[in-house]
Image: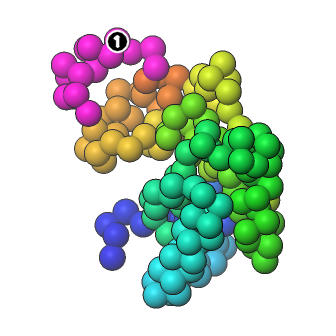
Amino acid sequence: LDAHPRIVECSAAARAQGVEPGMLLGRALGACPDLQLVEHDAAVIEDRGVLFVERLEELGAGVEPLRPGRVLFAVRPLLRLYEGEAGVVERVFAQFPRVRDVLRVGIGPNRFVAEVAAWRAAPGRCLSVEQEHVRPLLAPLPSRILPIESRMLETWQALGLDTLADVAVLDRSKVAERFGPA
């Protein structure tokens, strides 16, 4: 059992109460005391994850699984094949007609931005973020979404570094000196 369980997905009603995917379970329960948790069946999720990857690979995508239900793949090699970004996205959605309304697709100039874009996309939609829109997208987001050790995150929060905008204004060399190169 994960020492810090997080919400994987939530309903629109839970979102209206302030619950978001990725949120710590304790915070989610604080935001929505009536939250009903649904346990997942690991074997079923793994089987569907394999099918998910296989269907994307059928499109010609070089897929990198992140965790069940989340994958990364480079869009650039598929752009000419499917006549642009919209064509690639439509092909992805067409591969999953039964769950199209819950799929989220994110496109960005790097892995992190693409994953954040998918996380921020409305269910059944794609959010594409151009380089000039990266800062406005990331700035208000909580620093807890960064892939950093929990001890470092706790220190950052104690220092008041609650958003990515707070982190972005710091001098990189001083951060690396204090917290290490990661």
Q: Is residue 177 above or below residue 47?
A: above
Residue 58 point in image, percent of width and height: 62, 67
Stretch in magenta:
168-182
Quadrant of the rendered structure where residue 38 is?
bottom right
Residue 176 counted in the magenta span: yes
Relative placement, left or right, of 182 versus 12 is left
Q: Which residue does the image show at 28% across and 38% down from the upper left?
A: 152
Q: Which residue does the image show at 38% across and 35% down from the upper left?
A: 157
Badge 1: residue crowd in 10 Å (few <14, some 14–19, many ≥20):
few
Q: In this view of the protein, which residue sits in the foreground, 44 or 39?
A: 44
Identify the element where label 1 is drawn. loop
Q: Which residue does the image show at 78% across and 77% down from the upper left?
A: 98
Q: Is residue 103 above or below residue 160?
A: below
Q: Is residue 5 above or below residue 169?
A: below
Residue assigned mark 1: 171
Residue 134 counted in the magenta span: no
Look at the image and tell me whether residue 124 can be seen. yes
| Quarter of the figure that contains the C terminus | top left
